[in-house]
Image: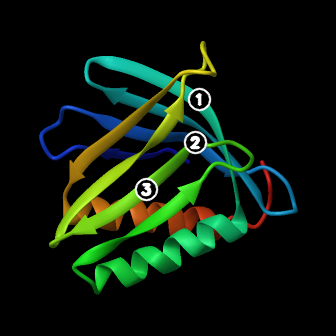
Amino acid sequence: MDIAIAATDGSAVVELRNARLVDCEGHYGALVRLRYEGRQYKRPFWFDRSDVAEFLKESRWLRRSISGEALLPHAGRSDFLLLSRKGGAWQLGGKVLQEDHPDMHVRFTLPISSPDVDRFLSACTELMASATPD
């Protein structure tokens, strides 16, 4: 499954390419692709079922709130995705290590629309429903 979300002005895109359940223990994998400030970044991204569940729980709370954050951490690394809402405005941010230079990273924040948030969260919910690993 490919999950993508774009900035409202079209200047940047975050994708979780080939997101899937990778084993029966609840580990997920994807390739994070980020197009941001004219550059492209890509990096394998691993996360646990419990992290996705917590991210979705916090995201549901954000839908009813005007501010807050929901974190999706990379399992075992400092990479992360962060969905946030401030004063009703949505943002997707995070930190992605560069594949070619693991000691270097990019931090990003994208303004996103409410319908895109809904699509992103629906895709994450569908991913959680995966019963068998690929």
Q: Residue 67 is drawn in which quadrant? A: bottom left
Percent across and percent down for residue 36 are 31, 28
* Amino acid at circle 3: Leu
Q: According to the image, label 3 marks what residue?
A: 82
Q: In screen coordinates, is 90 left or right of 119? A: left
Q: Amino acid at mark 1?
A: Arg
Q: Is residue 112 left or right of residue 14?
A: left
Question: As rendered, which of 78 and 9 lies closer to the eye?
Answer: 78
Camera-side residue of 76 and 60: 76
Secondary structure category for the residue under label 2: loop
Rendering coords of residue 39 (x, y %): 34, 17
| In the depicted structure, whether residue 122 falls above or below residue 47 | below
Q: Secondary structure at mark 1?
A: strand
The Cα–Cα distance between marks 2 and 1, rounded to whole angstroms, is: 9 Å
Marks 3 and 1, the one that precedes in the sequence: 1
Question: Do labels 2 and 3 touch, CB within 8 Å?
Answer: no
Classify residue 37 by image quadrant.
top left
* Residue 73 lies in quadrant: bottom right
Residue on which the image places disc 1: 43
- Furthest residue in direction right, as rendered: 24
Return the mark for residue 79.
2
Q: Nearer the viewer, mark 2 or mark 1?
A: 2
Give the residue at the far top of this rendering: 100
Residue type indicated by callout 2: Asp
Q: Is residue 100 shown above or below 108?
A: above
As measured in the structure, the alpha-carbon distance from the residue carrying label 3 to the one carrying label 1 is 16 Å
**Residue drawn 46% across the image and 23% down it:** 41
Q: Residue at x 53, y 69 (%)?
A: 55
**Disc 3 on helix, strand or loop?**
strand
In contact (CB < 8 Å): disc 2 and disc 1: yes
Which residue corresponds to the image point at 37% horizontal and 48% vertical from the top-left? 93
